[in-house]
Image (tube, grey):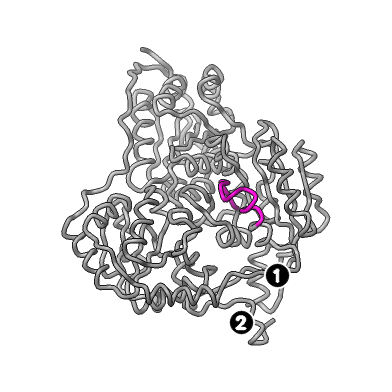
Amino acid sequence: MILNGSEIIVQCLKEQGVDTVFGYPGGAILNLYDELYKHRDEIKHILTSHEQGAAHAADGYARATGKVGVCIATSGPGATNLVTGIATAYMDSVPIVAITGNVGTSLLGKDSFQEVDIAGVTMPITKYSFIVKDVTKLADTIRRAFKIAASGRPGPVLIDVTKDVTANKCEYVPVTPAPIVRQTKPVDACEVAEAVELIKEAKKPVIFVGGGSVISNADEEVKKLAETVDAPVCDSLMGKGAFPGTDSRYMGMLGMHGTKTSNYAVTECDLLITLGARFSDRVTGNTKSFAKNAKILQIDIDEAEINKNIKVDYSIIGDVKAVLGEILKKLPKQDHAEWMAHVKEYEAKYPLVYHENEMTGPYFIEELYKLTNGEAIITTDVGQHQMWAAQFYKYKRPHQLLTSGGLGTMGYGLGAAIGAKNGNPDKTVINLAGDGCFRMNMNELATASHYDIPVIEVVFDNQVLGMVHQWQALFYGKRYSQTILPKNIDYVKLAEAMNVKAFRIEKKEDTDSVIKAALSCGGPALIDVVIDENENVYPMVPAGASIEDAFNEEDLKKKGVI
């Protein structure tokens, strides 16, 4: 059949099973928007308040569903407004396809109105960037983009389409896409045998779970490995949910704001089994002393991650789920009772604590966990609240915590929550944000209101840029340069102005009733949680220090620092 470019794009989206897209129209993309209008009963379009919100929503949709998220923007500033969201997805290996319009082919390279080389701009932050200037290549490009985004190590792909291509016509032949599988080489039997022997020799093993285990949906295999090896488990921020936070073997997060138990266990272990983690600097601290007593086994789908940040002793390239499946076939049950008891002593000695006599972020999150039965999808922005979310909400399954781990994007969470809720309408979706983060993209509250999307926005209102403020307090002589926020903004009134139900918590005793009211209100809601500006995140490892140097508030008091 003969179709124009816009019709081809829509038909290809339908081929790929796309049911929801997030975007913002403009001149160069109008032809596609006209076509989306004709197919509005088949593909739902969510008009976000800003293109960055569209990218974050596509990201949240992808993380929460496992599908490829789609966002759309026009040329020039519309396209460049997607860049932060695309980079966020790239750093955390999230499959999204961003479709942008551009000026007509004859106007390219002439500094035309709203022209920008978005394919060039995004080349370093995408798996692939296309510009389509020939309508006959459009359908194959879209199909290829979806395959690239979802296969192997997932990530974002950009398709830039000139305006004339969206209007030009050519023959379109429908194609039923083959199931997209993440390509990985066959698991090498010799490598598996070596890994099994390494595990059998260990006396003090630790399992370290990263985001690759979440992407791989390897939660069953990870749990079985922990039971078979008889080892304690820690995770990265991106690995949350791949091993249940309720399990007795779980020690907590590793690294800068990880638990002392995890940091000490990794420092003392003789084998670190690393599953889909890239050894970020926030995890390792000083790389020269990281896991200094251990042999390291790293399993990762991306060969580029092997020996990139930490030199490892053994590695297997492949999908975590597939590799663990092979290892578990050959690995006999191990017994490390003495090591497990030692780790339990650390847990008893160094629990996570907070000020129990006042309203705090950790207290709120613990109550939220109880009242949602640990079943909510939690999105976060970046900062202290993000670390509290990692420490005090126990994640039971993959894809339950959606957060910007690699790029650290303030303003990520609300858009991601909107995307996650659209992909999981039956799940409770809650975004945790600091007041500084909320100010970055609070306009997306209008999106939630417009579409009556029942997400809950929690604002931890301490009137400072909490994490930076904390660093200034500890390392910069309390010189709070530009981290004190205006104190004259009423977030409850702001939400109500957008027709969003809003609540405020200033006292601990109001917490449960407010959370219950927000959960039951049936539409979007905001909870303004007023906390002290000096409430900090502990434990903490100073930048560049060894993870075994983690300190908490009690340590600082003993040293007379506070």
Q: CA distance from mark 2 to mark 1?
A: 15 Å
- Residue 499 location (% of width, % of height): 77, 36
The answer to whether residue 402 is above or below residue 149 is below
In the picture, measured across the screen, residue 90 lies left or right of residue 335, that is right
The type of residue carrying mark 2 is Asp
Tag 2 near tag 1, CB within 8 Å? no
Label 2: which residue? 555
Q: Nearer the viewer, residue 187 or 410?
A: 187
Kindly state the secondary structure of the residue where label 1 is placed: loop
Quadrant for the C terminus in the image? bottom right
Residue at far bottom of view: 559
The mark nearer the N terminus, 2 or 1, is 1
Q: Residue at x 48, y 26 (%)?
A: 163
- Residue 27 location (% of width, % of height): 58, 27
Q: Is residue 378 magenta?
A: yes
Quadrant for the N terminus in the image? top left
Range of magenta residues: 367-380
Q: Nearer the viewer, residue 226 or 40?
A: 226
Tag in front: 2 or 1: 1
The answer to whether residue 108 is above or below residue 517 is above
> Quadrant of the rendered structure where residue 382 is?
bottom right
- Residue 201 location (% of width, % of height): 24, 73
Q: Residues within 10 Å of mark 2 (few under 14, many from 20)?
A: few
Q: Nearer the viewer, residue 207 or 405?
A: 207
Q: Residue at x 57, y 51 (%)?
A: 374
